[in-house]
């Protein structure tokens, strides 16, 4: 039987977050919010969704009229954080920059 994704240890999570400025831990999820107008946010979501489909890992996404929030955890690992979550977060940061989305501290 194939093993599922392996959750990171607390120490590994701290180290990974240290290398991901702007991302916050909320329980067993990492989150980040960007300021972007609604239609720009829709375009960014489509871009992120294309990448997610290719890598087989998905974020929870919340779009408001001027903000876009991503929440990432690995559902297949019991809603724990894995290396795949931090990989997706880095990809989202790159996509956000391409869409001129501004990080929001909140």
Image (cartoon, grey):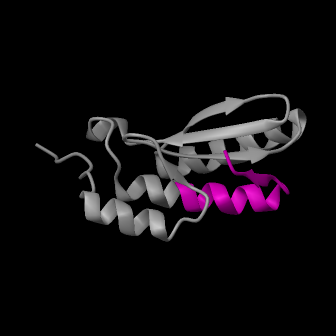
- Which residue, as the protein is rendered here, is positioned at the far front? 106
- Residue 103, percent from left and from top: 74, 54
The total of numbered circles placed on residues is 0
Q: Which residues are magenta?
A: 89-106
Residue 89 is drawn in which quadrant?
Answer: bottom right
Looking at the image, which residue is at 37% across and 41% down? 28
| 54 with respect to 48 (left or right) | left
Of residue 24 and residue 55, the one placed in the foreground of this image is: 24
| 23 with respect to 48 (left or right) | left
- Residue 91, percent from left and from top: 60, 59
Residue 102 is drawn in which quadrant?
Answer: bottom right
Position of the N terminus by quadrant: top left
- Residue 45, percent from left and from top: 72, 40
Looking at the image, which residue is at 37% across and 63% down? 14
Residue 79 is drawn in which quadrant?
Answer: top left
Residue 97 on the magenta span: yes
Looking at the image, which residue is at 46% across and 62% down? 17
- Which residue, as the protein is rendered here, is positioned at the far left? 1
- Residue 76, percent from left and from top: 31, 37
Position of the C terminus by quadrant: top right
Of residue 18 and residue 64, the one placed in the foreground of this image is: 18
**Where is 95 relative to 42, above or below?**
below
Residue 38 on the magenta span: no
Of residue 29 and residue 85, the one placed in the foreground of this image is: 29
| 98 with respect to 77 (left or right) | right
Looking at the image, which residue is at 54% across and 40% down? 71
**Where is 16 relative to 81, above or below?**
below
């Amino acid at each position: 039987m194939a093993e599922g994704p392996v959750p990171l240890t607390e120490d590994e999570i701290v180290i990974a977050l240290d290398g991901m400025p702007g991302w916050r831990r909320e329980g067993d999820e990492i989150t980040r919010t960007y300021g972007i107008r609604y239609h720009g946010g829709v375009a960014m979501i489509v871009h992120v969704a294309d990448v997610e489909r290719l890598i087989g890992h998905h974020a929870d996404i919340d779009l408001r009229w001027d903000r876009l929030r991503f929440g990432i955890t690995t559902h297949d690992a019991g809603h724990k954080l894995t290396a795949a979550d931090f990989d997706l977060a880095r990809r989202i940061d790159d996509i956000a920059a391409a869409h001129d989305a501004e990080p929001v501290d909140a």
